[in-house]
Image (spheres, rainbow, N blue to C red):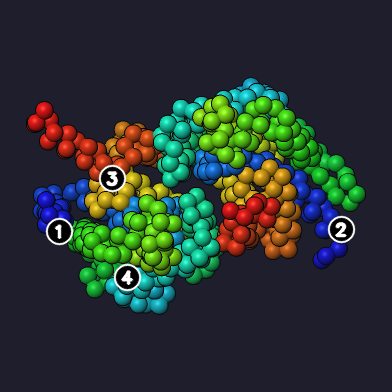
Amino acid sequence: MKVYPSIALVVAVLAIVPFVTASNAVLNFLVMALLIALAGQGWNLLGGYGGQYSFGHAAFFGTGAYVTAILQVRYGINAWLGLFIGVAAGALVGAVIGALSFRSGLKGSYFSLVTLAFAEVLRIVASVTPITGAGVGTLIKLDLRPEAFQFQSRAPFYWIALGFVGLSLVLMRAIEQSRFGAYLVAIRENEDAAEALGVDAFKVKLAAMTVSAAITATAGCFYAQYFLFLDAAIAYGPWISVDALLAPIVGGAGTLFGPLAGALVIKTLGEATKLMTGGAPGLDLVIYGLVLIAVVGLAPRGIAGLAARLIPRRRTGAQP
Amino acid sequence: MLSPVILVPAVLNGLMTGAVYALVALGLTLVYGVLHIINFAHGALLTAAMFAAFFAYTLLRLDPYLAAVILTPLFYVLGFGLQRFIIGPAAHGEDRNFLLVTLGLAIVIENALLYAFRADTRTINLPYAFNVIEVGNAFLAVPKVIAFGAVIAVALALWAMMQWTDTGKAIRAVAKEKLGAELSGIDVGHIYAVTFGLGTACVAIAACLLIPTYYVNPTAGDAFVLIAFTIVVLGGMGSIAGALIGGLFVGVVESLSSVFLGASLGQIGIFVMFIVMLLVRPSGLFGARA
């Protein structure tokens, strides 16, 4: 199957949902899944394609969210403009963290550690500085007009989130087919060999991290508009760092549809656990952790890997 | 402000606190030194051990120092089993997978504790927890002095074990040259599990030393592990002496900065130090250049 038409097909199928059901619970669930898919697609570019495992994508999510919110609340800037500035700010944070860590040659677990630490520093700073509302948090004023990026019903939010996910899929496909994408995969497979062949690993990784941060920051900006409330534990909390890496890994790291498939699966699992246990705190995350271990142990290439393993088997089965 | 009346007690108290940091870091650095991988489940295991020590006291009336005698071998077995039956097989020998599996374990342990015990913060009341010893013009809490002594003893015992026992030599061999060790008949998978067990045992001891003066909740271990990461990076990944000295150093820095800056900024100071260390010299002050 051609890739761009499949992207169009997936987006089209998902776009029909609000016509089929008006249930807020369903749309809410799907918006969250799309949000995680978007944040996860950002992680996927750097981690899945580039092999640089960030444990701190909350740094970009939170920056996007806070910038969008603070610009509106404190400076009266339009939400849509705030969105663009938020994405740019997220990309900038990504570029700075990337430049610092890649310049110092941090790889593997060191890179994971330093990204985790940056996200934690931002969380602590956000929980004490007055501009973020410190412990109280930031509340965006209710203003249900499309110009203010707020809507009466869930459906427009849903379509916008879907639009972002669709854009991210097209962008990732373009990257996959570009020279830059090939360099990135080469670095993941063997950085020294890639450098020996003339790939400027620092530049490529830095670019990947910047774009990755921008994508995840978009999810953060959207989150701010959707929930209209932020505090440090939401914006910079470890939950988003975990979700952003869990979705692509469950779906298949380094695959185009991995984050979306993974996000739908983990969110379904999470909701199912909540239903079964009556919303007891912690148990849904226990399931997430178990799924992470199980996927890494049993299906290292995620859902995409499982699918790839099943399909050729059927084909070869036809001719003994 | 810089009078010795304030400084000496601050430094001594910092050394006492730093000793426990050092023990947590010791477990982390041991695993890193041999498996060359950061164990992200270390903090969750520390929290689990703190809960174990807490319930040993409240349910079984076991003094934490007595509980250490039971919990340490128990957590050794737990760590051994985790590495042998879960982390090792699931990681397929890939570093990236190891990171993810230990992260997954951390999420499972932390949230299972949250589910079982809620987010409540618990403390125990030991009759002697507030006794103090006077050293010069400083008053030191008895549990902290015990902790300091215990950590030094554990570090020495660990060092002696590494130096003189066959297991210790095998661990060092695997740390230096995995393939060579395997070729000379060392079961690398077993040594990995032993090392992970030792790292987890360190955490159990640390938990028993902490619980008399500290609280426990499902994320109590995290604070220590972030400090332990800093110490491990500071002291050089894999270095026992580095972890000990680094731990004491960080304890003193934290104590002094909370005297001069206030407690809430102390945490950020450690993070900033950590990031700067990672960026400037990731091999640590005492480690060999990678």
Residue A257 image point, x, y percent: 23, 51
Dot 4: element: helix
Residue designated by label 2: B5
Dot 3: element: helix
Front: mark 2 or 1: 1
Amino acid type at circle 3 is Gly
Crowding near the residue tagged with mark 4, few <14, some 14–19, many ≥20 C-alpha atoms within 10 Å: many
Amino acid type at circle 4 is Leu
- Between the C-alphas of marks 2 and 4, the distance is 54 Å
Q: What residue do we see at 83% from left, 41% from top?
A: B132
- Between the C-alphas of marks 1 and 4, the distance is 26 Å
Q: Are marks 2 and 1 in contact (CB under 8 Å)?
A: no
Residue B141 image point, x, y percent: 79, 42
Front: mark 3 or 2: 3
Do marks 1 and 3 share a subunit? yes
Q: Chain of mark 1?
A: A
- Between the C-alphas of marks 3 and 2, the distance is 60 Å
Do marks 4 and 3 share a subunit? yes
Residue B263 image point, x, y percent: 66, 57
Do marks 2 and 4 share a subunit? no
Front: mark 1 or 4: 1
Residue A86 lies in what quarter of the image? bottom left
Crowding near the residue tagged with mark 2, few <14, some 14–19, many ≥20 C-alpha atoms within 10 Å: few
Residue B212 image point, x, y percent: 70, 36
The outermost residue toward the left is A318
Residue designated by label 1: A4
Residue designated by label 3: A251
The outermost residue toward the right is B136
Q: Chain of mark 2?
A: B
Residue designated by label 4: A83
